[in-house]
Amino acid sequence: MKRGGTNGGGTNAMADHEQLAGDTRERILRATESLFMEHGYSATSLRAITARARVNLAAVNYHFGSKQTLIREVFERRLGPLNAARIAQLDELEAKAGGRSLAIEQIIEAIVAPALLVGKDPLARGAVFMRLLGRAFAEPAETLRDILPGQYRQVVIRFKQALVRALPEMPDQELTWRMHFMFGTLSYAMAGNDALKLIATCSLEGAEDAEAIMHRLIPFLAAGLQAPLPPSRGARAAPGRQAA
Amino acid sequence: MKRGGTNGGGTNAMADHEQLAGDTRERILRATESLFMEHGYSATSLRAITARARVNLAAVNYHFGSKQTLIREVFERRLGPLNAARIAQLDELEAKAGGRSLAIEQIIEAIVAPALLVGKDPLARGAVFMRLLGRAFAEPAETLRDILPGQYRQVVIRFKQALVRALPEMPDQELTWRMHFMFGTLSYAMAGNDALKLIATCSLEGAEDAEAIMHRLIPFLAAGLQAPLPPSRGARAAPGRQAA
DNA sequence: CGATGATTCAAACGCACGTTTGAACTCGGC
DNA sequence: GCCGAGTTCAAACGTGCGTTTGAATCATCG
């Protein structure tokens, strides 16, 4: 009996008759990705998921234990490899560069390109996940608040290091803000047409081509990160810390 | 009897005994804003709203007809004036400039500053709404898809005009994409600490000071909009203008 | 005061939700 | 040929949802 089982995520010790079991699990995960993308987290029911996956309603609780655990696995199985690839690409770039600092464009590409790879994999339905991920940051649901920070902590730290080295003149606070802005743009761009249609007055050609979007995104972000500093706002009249 | 009434939104013809009635309506609207911000659209129930507003459960359906109409009013009453103010500020800038084209920074400020004004009004609880609005673009709920495009169409058209004039060299497609990126950054920045905390490794000081954020945002966005063009992607081996 | 219309209220409606249950299948190994 | 673990299934559980209802309350005015 499996019944429940907040089994931690790994479950590598699967018997060789995993074909059917794995099939059900996988179908549930894919249906969940699709439906989360279409309707968001809170608005997607287990009944909708199991209907799309053509699986019994109880299968979710049997294989994942709860809806919450299912959600966690949906994000972790994609986000883990994606963020690992980002860090790997940055490591490789820095190794090649020796001691020299990287170009801003290279650093940004190390964030964007791995997402692009995942998004292009038709087998993994990565494009669906990328659009879902863009939405996830705006979801205030508690479940996601547990998952995302843990998945992103290392990536943020690592890229901040690289950017500090590439932009030695930039005050730390300013750089942190600009990284925040950058992730916002990325998140929005990944959410794709859906958010886009909300304000678009005319359809954008090439909206499907993730690679084209990346090559439009990189110069935009690189210029933003390197923008001239704003007039210092700390010096109002007294050296107050930052208060309004 | 009022009972139901998709009364269109205006309802200016309110008798002088509006004190209590208006109080209930207003309390519901404010509670809805707060709860949407905290938990998102789908996860906020009428029971939670009426509990926070300290109002009877049936009051929502009495005053607004349905949850859907309530949501629509929450957005329209704030978004209408906000976007009108944005267009007005842009009109004024262009009138002052005579025939000369505006600076990118001025155009961006005409988008951001009115949001700031709304956000600073403590009476209107504008800050709550601004954060909610940042989230709204990522909500795939059908209700919002009906509301937001209508509210933003004019603003997008108007600012595109101004940006085309300020950046005559920029291809139309490229400019449209960059506007898309810009709205993404804005949306994310407005959502504020909530989205920020998801990836932040350390707390950002000054996160509460919307004006400080604006003055960090404008140079970032202005530089992004004016970034060098990416290598043209139609021609692969052609003499791309800006290659890595 | 008593009539009138607007508003509030407690209670209930039917429905969809996440989860649980226990029986029915599947299938390799004894 | 059946045992038992793994998996699927139909049905039900209790809960909370948006909405409706009809009576109670309130303010206004003839």
Image (cartoon, coloured by chain):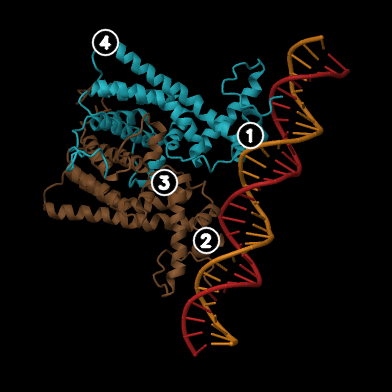
Chain colours: A cyan, B brown, C orange, D red
The part of the image, by quadrant, that contains residue A92 is: top left
Which residue matches tag 1? A54
Mark 2 vs mark 3, foreground winner is 2
Check if mark 2 and mark 1 are on a common chain: no
**Disc 4 on helix, strand or loop?**
loop
- Which chain does tag 1 point to? A
Question: Marks 2 and 3, how far apart in space?
Answer: 25 Å
Residue at left offset 13%, top offset 54%: B96
Label 2 vs 3, first from the N-terminus: 2
Mark 2 vs mark 4, foreground winner is 2
Q: Viewer-proximal residue, A210 or B1? A: B1
Residue at left offset 54%, top offset 28%: A73
The amino acid pointed to by label 3 is: Ala
- Which chain does tag 4 point to? A
Which residue matches tag 4? A98
Q: Which mark is residue B136?
A: 3
Crowdedness near tag 4: few (<14), some (14–19) or many (≥20) residues, C-alpha within 10 Å: few
Crowdedness near tag 2: few (<14), some (14–19) or many (≥20) residues, C-alpha within 10 Å: some
Mark 2 vs mark 1, foreground winner is 2
Q: Are marks 4 and 3 in contact (CB under 8 Å)?
A: no
Q: Viewer-proximal residue, A137 or A134? A: A137
Q: Say if residue A206 shows up in the picture.
A: no
Seen in the image, is A220 located left or right of residue B140? left
The amino acid pointed to by label 2 is: Val
The amino acid pointed to by label 4 is: Gly
Mark 3 vs mark 1, foreground winner is 3
Q: Which mark is residue B55?
A: 2
Question: At which x and y percent is residue A119?
Answer: 43, 27
Q: Say if residue B144 shows up in the picture.
A: yes
Label 1 vs 4, first from the N-terminus: 1
